[in-house]
Amino acid sequence: MADIDFDGVTKVYGDAHPAVDHLSLHIDDGEFMVLVGPSGCGKTTALRMLAGLEEISSGTLRIGGTVVNNTLPKDRDVAMVFQNYALYPHMSVAQNMGFALKIRGESKREIARKVDDAARILRLTEYLDRRPKALSGGQRQRVAMGRAIVRSPQAFLMDEPLSNLDAKLRVEMRSEIARIQRLLSVATVYVTHDQVEAMTMGDRVAVLRDGQLQQVATPQDIYDRPANEFVAGFMGSPPMNLVPCRLRPGHSRVEVLVADQSFEIPLGYADSHALPEAGADVVLGVRPEDVLIADATGANVLKVRVERVEALGSEALVHLAWGEGGAPVARDARPGSFIAKVGPRVTFSPGDVVSVQVSPEHVHFFDAGSGVSLRAGGR
């Protein structure tokens, strides 16, 4: 059991832009840390440096307080679970799970005990004599996990282990992996591009972009208080609506200009944001579930046109727009769009013009240039 510490870790391939750029991240012993981001963000490279499969260009990497920059993979006492399972087809489940222990020279009795213990945790006991071809995708993934568990490593490293499974099985395995990790209480670093996996599995989530750490926090903190526009737009399904706007402060409230329409927020709420000077361009952020469609008129509504409705059974996503085919706007106003998440029984049709309201307490503002959140107190 051990904690993990990335201290300014960088990986550069030749003269290219760093694949991982000064990553500083601490993972506590027993913590489930998810590295998430789009393809090419550096998450798998970070994991491979931790496993010893990639050399570190600069910075320091510690496992259990010991610097492992130049330690061979076999001597790091970590176990990696890959995307493609990498099972031996000619071996039984029990032989696959116990192979690393056999190579390590452990006795047959000790191997059998550890394999039986892991099989019980993974609910694989009845499959120990089968070969991989006789197993489902989810069962094969559990065997790959069992091969890691029997080694009793200091840390588990998982590189998109569910990407080869169908949607239903992915949901089941998310819960299963989280259950096993809590049971074993071993530091786990889990790489995924799927923000739903990140939100539902991690104790904390580290969001990466272009090799740089954007934010690390609990899933709920990242959802409620994104550090910047990228995190806001990446985390959440559907993602946060991000709309260019302009601020016009008054005596008791701030007017938010969207195209040639506006809504107002009280100064008390505006004080919780480090808002720029009057007339400044900012980016308004609001989650789809916080966009309310209402039959209303007045200062705090926006007129928009329904573009399309996605019925998802338990809910519906209403795509709304203004300008360029959406609700009419002034000639010099910029067109835009956003999504509202509503109940399943909607009566809207494409082409309808409707009113929407946004609750002030659910509004985010981001700097139009840097994308950094303008919430007072920063991250």
Image (cartoon, helix red, strand yellow):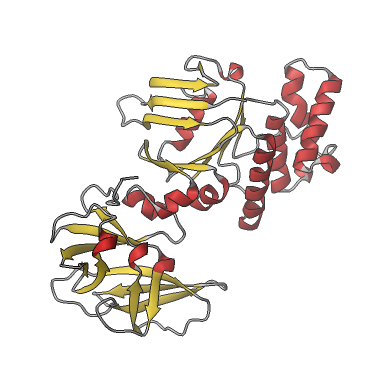
Query: Whole-percent x and y of residue 308?
Result: 41, 76
Residue located at (42% from left, 20% from top): 60
Residue located at (53% from left, 31% from top): 28
Query: Whole-percent x and y of residue 127?
Result: 83, 41
- Which image quadrant is residue 366 in? bottom left
Quarter of the picture holding the C terminus? top left
Would residue 57 be seen by someone viewing this image from the given angle?
no
Is 296 placed above or below 225 here?
below
Left or right: residue 340 compared with residue 191: left
Is 312 placed above or below 352 here?
above
Quarter of the picture holding the N terminus? top right
Query: Whole-percent x and y of residue 332?
Result: 13, 71
- Total marks in image: 0
Residue located at (83% from left, 40% from top): 125
Is 182 placed above or below 136 here?
above
Q: Toward the viewer: 40 or 46?
A: 46
Would residue 58 be seen by someone viewing this image from the given angle?
yes
Q: Toward the viewer: 339 or 15?
A: 339
Left or right: residue 211 compared with residue 52: left
Query: Whole-percent x and y of residue 63?
Result: 53, 22
Left or right: residue 95 compared with residue 142: right
Left or right: residue 281 compared with residue 219: left
Is 109 placed above or below 83 here?
above
Q: Toward the viewer: 242 or 159?
A: 242
- Which image quadrant is residue 160 in? top right
- Which image quadrant is residue 151 in? top right
